[in-house]
Amino acid sequence: MNDILGDWKRTHYCGHLNAEHIGREVCLMGWVQRRRDHGGLIFIDLRDREGIVQLALDPDRDPEAHQKADRVRGEFVVAIKGEVSRRPDGTLNPKMKTGEVEIEVRELRILNSAKTPPFMIDEFSEVAENTRLKYRYLDLRRPALQRTLMLRHQVTRIVRDYFSGEGFLELETPFLTKSTPEGARDYLVPSRVNQGTFYALPQSPQLFKQILMVSGFDRYMQIVKCFRDEDLRADRQPEFTQIDCEMSFVDRDEVLSVMEAMIARVFREAIGVEVPLPMPRMTYAEAVGRFGVDNPDLRFAMELVDISEIVSNSGFKVFSDAVQGGGLVKAMNIKGGATLSRKDLDDLGEFVKIYGAKGLAWVKVNADGWQSPIIKFFSADEVAGIAQALSAEVGDLLVFVADTFRIVNDALGRLRGHLGHKLGLIDKGAYKFVWVTDFPLLEWDGETRRHVAVHHPFTAPMDEDVTLLDTDPGKARAKAYDLVLNGSEIGGGSIRIHDRAVQSKMFELMGIGDEEASIKFGFLLEALEFGAPPHGGIAFGLDRLTMILADTDSIRDVIAFPKTQKATCLMSEAPGEVDDKQLRELGIKLVTRPK
Amino acid sequence: MNDILGDWKRTHYCGHLNAEHIGREVCLMGWVQRRRDHGGLIFIDLRDREGIVQLALDPDRDPEAHQKADRVRGEFVVAIKGEVSRRPDGTLNPKMKTGEVEIEVRELRILNSAKTPPFMIDEFSEVAENTRLKYRYLDLRRPALQRTLMLRHQVTRIVRDYFSGEGFLELETPFLTKSTPEGARDYLVPSRVNQGTFYALPQSPQLFKQILMVSGFDRYMQIVKCFRDEDLRADRQPEFTQIDCEMSFVDRDEVLSVMEAMIARVFREAIGVEVPLPMPRMTYAEAVGRFGVDNPDLRFAMELVDISEIVSNSGFKVFSDAVQGGGLVKAMNIKGGATLSRKDLDDLGEFVKIYGAKGLAWVKVNADGWQSPIIKFFSADEVAGIAQALSAEVGDLLVFVADTFRIVNDALGRLRGHLGHKLGLIDKGAYKFVWVTDFPLLEWDGETRRHVAVHHPFTAPMDEDVTLLDTDPGKARAKAYDLVLNGSEIGGGSIRIHDRAVQSKMFELMGIGDEEASIKFGFLLEALEFGAPPHGGIAFGLDRLTMILADTDSIRDVIAFPKTQKATCLMSEAPGEVDDKQLRELGIKLVTRPK
């Protein structure tokens, strides 16, 4: 075939060479990071996936190779043969893995040329995001992105190894699934064969993995793409990857212990971090009580304190009215926060308003006493009670929100997270895991006037709460659990309903009639009647997990071909136009023309 | 939580128990395969993923468990605690893996009941395909399907292990990609955010994996779903799974040797078959010459023989006219086929007509000479020449087709395959691999009056044929290769074009203008200008590969949730209806209402 490579075969990756290879003949292939001319010699930094090595071309030793090297520019693709040698004294580069050696090049072939790239392929270039996305193939050459995507690969390897050792089978579930009316956020795929009908892309393989349990596969896992037709957000993609698991004949404790061991193994093998097991657990009620949210960041303290009892009869009507109206008053002690300016305090007040609070009351604990617009309304007992409840010390800032249960927790919980970052309270190197359990099963949707499932409609109620389904369903707790890491939910799941009657009861509470249930979930419902085992599972977000492991805030660092609203050239970023023939075949017509 | 399992934890799988466990206390959970009452005792065959074990319930030993067992029916889900004991003499069952033991049950819990299933869950039930698909969750409980899906899991494990060891990275490519006009067979996904535009589901990650090579990831693999909007066929699904690979800085030989080692490992580890390496190779020209097809089944001989020269001036005008008109005459010796009846011969004649042949000439080699309607037209030299070319012996049947190159090879090649099965010529236990190489690059499409790529437009021409692109493009061969196993193509790939100018030339030959090329492939074309390495790859069909390993002809045996046109209840089988609100949000209208 007379291939461009002829009989040349690469012997090493550039980045793997070191003093041990001195004297060896090698054949390398890669990209030109940099070319320098120095006293007649040409030096080329040659880069591949594994790193960079220096090539030295001497016109006296091999004039032909030197001549070719003279034509080489940045990002040219070259192959060389040569000998690994120790760099001359004084030219060693201890910052490079390969810094002790260089290659004395004997032969050089230019495999491809390259136009001048719009930015340097290095760690340091500050390049506009837009440009980087437009030239994603160049951006992906940067060592930082190469590392995160290799890390992602490694994570999937570790996960699959672990689950395989635990007897899980990786089984594929379909992507083209039956669509149903009102399938909000489903991507729809019109059928050519059966015009007028649509497939839906799955938001998760939930029903399929439950069917696999009914089918007796016992332990299932899959690393699988899921789809949600939502606007793009900074940390969310319309297609995302889940580590999806399901187990039969297990209770919650077994699911949690199998899963936390998987996570610990990933952290150990991927980034060398030991995660102490078992991971701590916290009920939903405790999480919201102490931290205001169900995904608490445990890398710092600053817990919420309920002072409702102390201020229930306070002269400060905002507080006492809230308590007497069925709401509550909670406070947080921002240690050392007394130095915040009036402007800072105003900003915090604006922040809590986003979450529905009417305002943020505050007290500065100064050496000469409390300073606050509301201090005058409090009795000495109340001041003493608050001070004790919050362990107030000189220099602290106490902040308060009084409102309904939901607004108080939401506002203060979010404020806590905000301040954790803003005030640098977070221990950056820490990985704080917590299982949050015992979520509510249902919540009331005032708009549609029916209950909706907090997790999903297949989540089992806690056994001791089953009777509540008839009396006070909003109070029933679920066998649901989330794994929270550093304030981010990285996984969530539940023990599922395996009893047909309980499943029907759930649908009834959610206002889903028999016909609707049959259209949407008929296959599962029927399956539950033919010997469904007790089962439960969980799904982890691979994208989020990899972001945390790679210590990046940008989802675009962990996905090779992200979707984005900004870039215009990236092949996967945006949907495209189709022609009339295609539409005719699908039996559809455009109402709106593309912009 | 008072879980239904309480503090019970399964200790073993049913199918794993044997004489070594005698005396052990075990806790098992599974499905009731069968219940028998025998002299006051109840015996239950309990089944899980790993097999079946016999439970024995004695009313004297544990009346409560015995009583519960009395309520148990087929496919009930039960958990038991008991002791493994040796079966009484005379009741050992050597056909069962667990046939030496039974469990003396002390406690039994019914975890779920089951309606009477529409068919027995065993190896032997002959059940209508339709019923099996309707109750797929029950069908999937059958040991045969459990085994094939576990085998599929195992194959993906072996493949990933192998590639990981070879330095391949599993990188994810997008499912929602940019659609293009005329994207035949693309599934389209209307965008909600940008109404009037569509995503396309990928028919393969081809462009993305090439971009990953341009990005320097060096070695990529992915086990990935692909989509093709075509009618269902027996062996084809609209969503199918590929083992997709791409490598940089390699020529064809290196791709082939890395890939055949992977396949050999799969056969060794999954089914214990040693595949001799290197695998044989054959050019496309040789394959078509000897076997009429580019996917020859090498499990049996019966090659095609070109007798054009012998009969070019024959008195049998059908032969001589074909040769003189630029066509050819080929023949096949069906050893021992002289016993075929006139009806059989007529059927073979009808068979070749499907592939465009006007008829099938034949000669029976009898002890008393040749018997054939056409024998009278041949000279003695021609008879001798044919007899020698085909090594004709008494009892053989010689068959002939005279026509154009394409029709002769197609008709005789397919006939060969057909007879291989029909006459039992195939060595059933054999695995005959062959790499078919040097495919034509382009073929002429009379309808659109332009060249189309035989493999795909990114396949590189053979270096020595590059000049043919200007002079006689139809003659140019490609650096393309297929892996054929037992007459099935299980993989195909090529060395890709890494040179922008050659890529443009290809598009030009295919009648793809600059604008069209830019819309469809602009991202790749631009990338080729910024330092694309030489690269190539391949994709294997996981479904087909698993079918061969599992020795099944039905694709539904290797996919948990297949699509089918027959069944009506399977959740993934058919697209569904959507409501007006959903259509409005997508900016589309139905022209055709669903049937």
Image (tube, coloured by chain):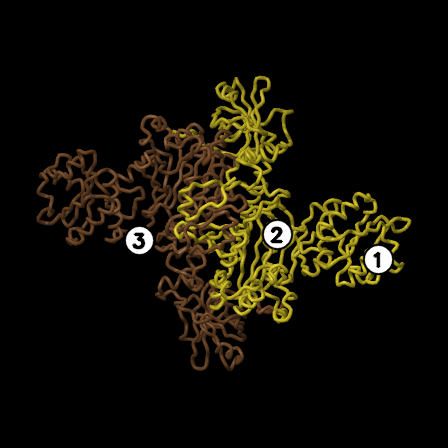
Chain colours: A brown, B yellow
Please state the chain letter of the residue tagged with numbered disc 3 in the rendered image. Answer: A
In depth, the one of A333 and A407 nearer the eye is A407
Badge 3 amino acid = Lys
Question: Cα distance, mark 1 to mark 2?
Answer: 41 Å
Disc 2 + disc 3, Cβ < 8 Å: no
Q: Give the letter of the chain under mark 1.
A: B
Q: Residues within 10 Å of mark 1 (few under 14, many from 20)?
A: some
Q: Residue B410, percent across and down?
A: 71, 54
Element type at mark 3 = loop
- Closer to the N terminus: mark 1 or mark 2? 1
Q: Quadrant of residue A463?
A: top left
Q: CA distance from mark 2 to mark 3?
A: 50 Å
Mark 1 lies on residue? B316
Q: Is residue B7 in sight in this rendering?
A: no
Q: Share a chain, discs 2 and 3?
A: no
A202 and B328: which is toward the camera = B328
| A509 is higher (above) or lower (below) than B158 | above
Inter-mark Cα distance, 3 to 1: 90 Å
Residue type, numbered disc 2: Ile
Residue at image mark 3 = A428
The x and y percentages for residue A436 are: 34, 40
Residue bearing mark 2: B490
- Looking at this view, is A87 or B559 the one in front? B559
Question: Residue at (45%, 63%) from the top-left corner?
Answer: A137
